[in-house]
Amino acid sequence: MFSKIKLLITLVFVLILPCFVFALDKDKGINQHLFDTLRLNRVEDVVIGYNELTGKIRFIGTSHDNPIKLKETFRNIDKLSKDIYDKTGKFYIESIKNFIGVSDINNELKLIKFSENSYKDTFIRYQQTFYNIPVFPGEIIIQLNKNLQLISLTSKIVPDINIRTSPLIDSAKSKDIALKAVAKWYKEASDSLKIQEPELWIYNPIVFNIKNNKNYLVWKITVESKDLKPIKHLILVDAFDGKIRLHFNTIEKSLKRKIYDNYNNPELSLPGYGPVRMEGQGATGITDVDLAYEYMGDFYNFFKSNFNRDSIDGKGMTLVATVRYCETYDNCPYDNDFWSSQYQQIVLGDGTVTDDCVGHELGHAITDYSANLCYYMQSGAINESFSDIWGEFIDLTNGKGNDSPGYRWYLFEDDDSSRNMANPGMFDQPQRMSDYLYYCGTFDNGGVHTNSGVGNKTAYLITDGGYFNGYNISGLGITKTAQIYYETLTHLLTSGSDYIDLYYALYQGCMNLTGKYGITQYDCEQVRKATLATELNVSSKYCVYPKAPVCETGEPVDIFYDDIEGKAYWKLTPVTISSLPKYMYSSTYATSGTYSLYGENLDYLSDFAIAMKKSVPIPSNKIAYLHFDHAYDFESEESTMYDGGIVEYSTDGGITWHDAGSMIINNGYDGIIYTGAGNPLSGRYAYTGTSFGFTSSRLNLSSLGGKNVRFRFRIANDEAYADDGWYIDNIRIYTCQIKGIDLTGQWLNLNQTCRSGKCNIKGKFITQNTGTSVSTQFTVKFYLSSNNIFDEDDLLIKEIIIKTLKNDASKTLNLSIKLPSGASASGKYIIAFVDANGTVGEIDENNNKIVFGPME
């Protein structure tokens, strides 16, 4: 692997780095201190990418023609050993450690493995650790050429970790929590599951682009089925409080071949009955057996002929398949397929054996043995996309099945098509990051089978080309594209890579192979255009809850505001169950200041609320709103929502409460609480699942105008298991005012008395400035009118000059008006015209005429 050459390298310990191209954020600017630190030269083809959540470098890449040079002395070296590569890689990281989030490279980075590509570049993969505890899934990959010069760096690092490392929950307790949770979610008996020994890890949600920058010490546990059901659930149990911080099923829905046949009998285990056909044996006459044997050969030959890879592990591992598998009698025949990392084989349902299907499932094995992409969120979508790509490339090159132009890029078209890589939208998959079809929930491990459409469209464009989203792309063909994707998967992606990482990695993969397989710089430009067309370089706007506006127009005028820092306005109260959590405030997660309200997602049956201590008056003459910031993570598994929270209001001092869900106009309830686990809010709409960080919601309180109202945040939990809970901050009740002057008014009362043909009118009128600026002098005129519409023929009966009126202020006018002799207001109207002379420029000139009547 390592060339035996005699080297004498002079030590200077200076990193010479070419000019950066900021492809991720052109407005970010180039950090001058970074330039000074790295001693940059002005060269054109180096790319740097930042993580938008941490602000740290996530990628550096260049070409073989312009490597990044580190001058370091190693005297009397006979060969480049792994130790030398390791030290050199760490020297590069040391030079920019502050910009990637590493403090002490010797204690925070653990060498995982080395690998080589066709250029004989060496890839060094490091695991991030904190006091010898690994970080999930923190990794750095360094790519060095044979002269120890840097070609690329990929970083998936959690920066600035500061956390206690002594658990309060022991491993035995964590196993019990994980076992009960999986048994509940899959409705399995606990004794039908087996559990691996827990390991202490550190987890921060930002690695999955969740805007919750909190470090957790967790027990990393895998729970599997003893009965060979497709259950291999990874769970991270908080080592301090026992809450489950992350969980997902890692089952991904292998020339030596073994085929087993379970005859649709769920009582047969894996690998099952047989083997019924082995390498070199003739056909059995059983369709699924013979097709699996044939297509596994196609898979092996594709990877051997294109990449010289000997089976899934690169070492000649036997490819094993079980056909006509059944999970249970109720689910038989089994209409699905999966790769079992536990048994290192593919499992195929009756009649599902197609060339692209076999290639897809074995493609998951290639991923397991290379980048080991997490089967969750964008990492999982990329995992799925790579399997789709391998399956379709095999399908399009083996000369079998229906590959006519009308079916090119369809997946599983020889069985029942379920995806189209050229047109993902045909099957409700997104084809770019801004596509409205992009899925942002927790179902299907975060939409791995849906959001893979973005990766699939990218591969299609690189292969066949075409015009898409403003970019005209020249296709590279399958051979070149396959080489670029293989280089990317095996050397440039970490286990937690997202689509932005893939954006950088595909271009770097192409740059790495320039001059080989006919790949040119022009081809790399097409790769870049394809990834820009599918917008891999940006986060999906649909996965960030849009912040609820405070005011569409104007500025807020608070009736009630609490940033929770004073802890003065709230109380913890039971609702239908007397038990209460210990806390209702949190100092670990807030959008402003230090504290937020905290409704804990408890692991026992509970129903409680955090309620306002006092009511506040809601105005009747203006629209009032309730606005609050909040983040939530309630227990859920796929589409089943076990726990949740709702907003309620009371107009009688807290005696009775009503659901305020119908008043929510921005970011309302997002799920229905499951009815089968005893939650007190079963069957109710609520905030459920996860918000992926802080968002905000707003309620229109028009229906509560003129009433004294208080609100509460109600949380209900079932038994057995808990997630984090509900954090609520910056709660305000308010109206909206536009900047400027806005004069109007309202009548309080008005009466007429008449004696001897002479009539007097007495009453009170309030003139108001509801704007935000002080008004100068204006006149209020009062008219007697035969109808409720003002016109110039109406009789002027009074005028009053107001010299000034402050913003958000009012002035009461006591009226006593003598009508002309013989005149009466009976059956008529009195119209008050505020700023009748039009001397004040106002925000709204249409609310100056206020009518009273008809008079008695």
Image (cartoon, rainbow, N blue to C red):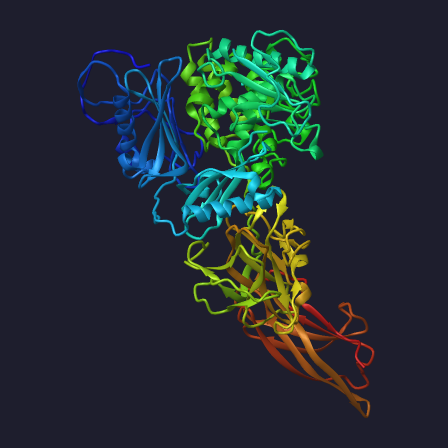
**Residue at point 35%, 14% (across, down):** 120
Q: Picture coordinates of residue 818 (x, y %)? A: 73, 85
Q: Picture coordinates of residue 48 (x, y %)? A: 39, 29
In the rendered image of this protein, does residue 525 appear above or below residue 836?
A: above
Would you say residue 691 is visible in this rendering? yes
Quarter in which the N terminus is drawn: top left
Q: Residue furthest left?
A: 75
Q: Quadrant of residue 152?
A: top left
Left or right? Give the position of 702 relative to 580: right
Comparing 120 with 757, the one in front is: 120
* Badge count: 0
Q: Picture coordinates of residue 263 (x, y %)? A: 68, 22
Q: Quadrant of residue 9?
A: top left
**Residue at point 28%, 30% (across, down):** 38
Comparing 450 with 527, the one in front is: 450
Quarter in which the C terminus is drawn: bottom right
Q: Picture coordinates of residue 516 (x, y %)? A: 43, 10
Comparing 659 with 318, the one in front is: 318
